[in-house]
Structures are given as C-alpha cells and as structure tokens.
Amino acid sequence: MEIIGRLTKNAGTRTTKSEKKVVNFSIAVNDSYKPKGASEVTKVTTYFDCSYWANPGIAQYLTKGTLVELHGRVELNVYNDMKGEARGSLRFHVNAIKLHGSGRNTATKKEPANIIAGELTEPLDDLPF
C-alpha cells in the first residue's frame, strides 16, 4: 500500500529490549470528495501512527510538516477506553520512505536525502538540472 501525507510532529527513535531501533512518527493524509447530489466538497483527514525499522538514521529528516510518501501495510488497532467506549487507531508499518518536502523546523535543517529501497544515502550534489 502507498500513502502520502505530512508529519504531524517530529519523529522519535526508540530502542527495544532486544537492542533494535524503531522510528515512530505520525502523518495526516488529507482527502476530499463531493457526495452525489451535494453542492459542497467534504474534506477528510486520516491520521496514521507509523513505525519504520529499516534505518533509524532517517529520523533526523522526519520533522513536523515534511511531506512523505510511504510504502508498507496498514493495521487497525481496536480497543475499549477507560469509559468502555470502543476506539480505534491506524498503524502503518513502513517498508520504504520517500521525502517530498522539508518540514517547518529550519533550526536543524539538513540537506534532503535520497532514499532507495528503504536505505538512506548521502545527498546528491551533482544533479543535472
């Protein structure tokens, strides 16, 4: 599955008990449609909690507002809250990330990176255009 959205906050890295690192972040995906017979467009925002295990070094590039294209699979988490009401959340298990734009955090702004098959490579300086 492929989704494109903007990060809602800066990504964070966590280390598991087995010493594996995971990058956690969340994105908002905006969509709009016009229902049949309606005159106004309906806008919908869907939020995904994301986890990426392949390369924890990418976390520094995943800042609030960054536009990303993600490839992976989606999982629905359903649970009852403290009041007994049914709740749910969407988790996206990311296999590959492609950056499309920088975030709003300019204090730690870095050169955009190239991501090929889930691996972070150094920025290209010799672009032909």
Image (cartoon, rainbow, N blue to C red):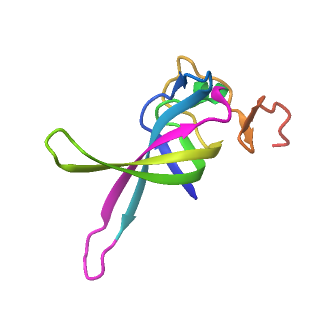
Residue at the left extreme of this rendering: 83
Residue at figure coordinates x 46%, y 52% from the top left: 75
Spot the residue most to the front.
Answer: 18
Which residue does the image show at 25% across and 77% down from the upper left?
38
Residue placed most toward the observer, 127 or 19: 19
Q: Position of residue 90 (x, y in %)?
A: 41, 49
Q: Is residue 97 above or below residue 18?
A: below
Q: Position of residue 112 (x, y in %)?
A: 67, 32
Give me the residue at 38% from left, 63% from top: 32
Count every numbered label the image shows and give the total. Answer: 0
Residue closer to the observer: 82 or 106: 82
Rendered position, 42 above or below 114 = below
Q: Which residue is more in the foreground, 54 or 77?
A: 77
Q: Residue at x 21, y 42 (%)?
A: 81
Q: In this image, 39 relative to 127: left or right?
A: left
Image quarter where the N terminus lies is: bottom right
Viewer-side residue, 23 vs 64: 23
| 51 to the left or right of 33 | right
Question: What's drawn in magenta, residue-wise?
Answer: 34-56
- Quadrant into which the C terminus falls: top right
Estimate the x, y position of residue 23 in percent, counting from the top left: 56, 31
- Residue 19 is drawn in which quadrant? top right
Relative to residue 16, is residue 118 drawn left or right? right
- The answer to whether 101 appears left or right of 116 in the picture is left
Q: Is residue 45 magenta?
A: yes
Tell me residue 29's x, y (percent): 44, 51
